[in-house]
Amino acid sequence: QVELVESGGGLVQAGGSLRLSCAASGPTFSGYKLGWFRQAPGKEREFVSTVIWSTGRTYYADSVKGRFTASRDKAKNTVYLQMNSLKPEDTAVYYCAGATSTQGAYAYWGQGTQVTVSS
């Protein structure tokens, strides 16, 4: 069983930065991908970023490219989302998610952490 716990959300002014963390526990994550998603009030959940656990390769939504950076620390079983140049439209609950293969669907989800960007 995979457990994902996010932390690091909060309130920040536009243009500021936050770093989210997602601590993962469970079996070895070789072959997994860990992703970040977000859901704003009244909107559907949307993809933000993915980290391929074995290689560290990352993928991003167009809306965050150049501003957000995802990474993983194998020793700590943790993935991070460094968010810079934050905009009010980045306000959402951010979720960490895990899939047991790079092509598979995300089956494991964290509880979410709130990010609020004030203008």
Image (cartoon, rainbow, N blue to C red):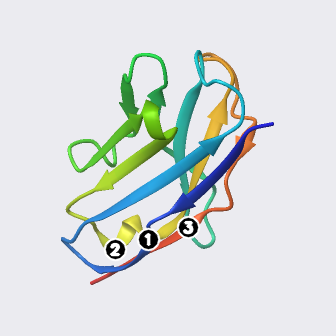
Q: Residue 88 carries which label?
A: 2
Is 59 situated left or right of 92 in this image? Answer: left
Q: Position of residue 111 (x, y in %)?
A: 68, 61
Circles 2, 1 touching at the beta carbon (< 8 Å): yes
Q: Residue 113 carries which label?
A: 3
Q: Which residue lies furthest to the front in this view?
A: 75
Q: Which residue occupies the foreground of this view, 10 or 61?
A: 10
Is disc 1 surrounded by few (<14), some (14 to 19) or many (20+) residues within 10 Å? many
Q: For numbered disc 3, what is the local secondary structure?
A: strand
Is 62 situated left or right of 38 in this image? Answer: left
- The amino acid type of the residue labelled 1 equals Thr
Residue for badge 1: 91
- The amino acid type of the residue labelled 2 equals Pro
- The amino acid type of the residue labelled 3 equals Thr
Q: Can residue 49 be seen in this snapshot? A: no
Q: Which residue occupies the foreground of this view, 106 or 42?
A: 106
Measured Cα–Cα span from mark 1 to mark 3: 11 Å
In the rendered view, would you say 62 is above or below 51?
below
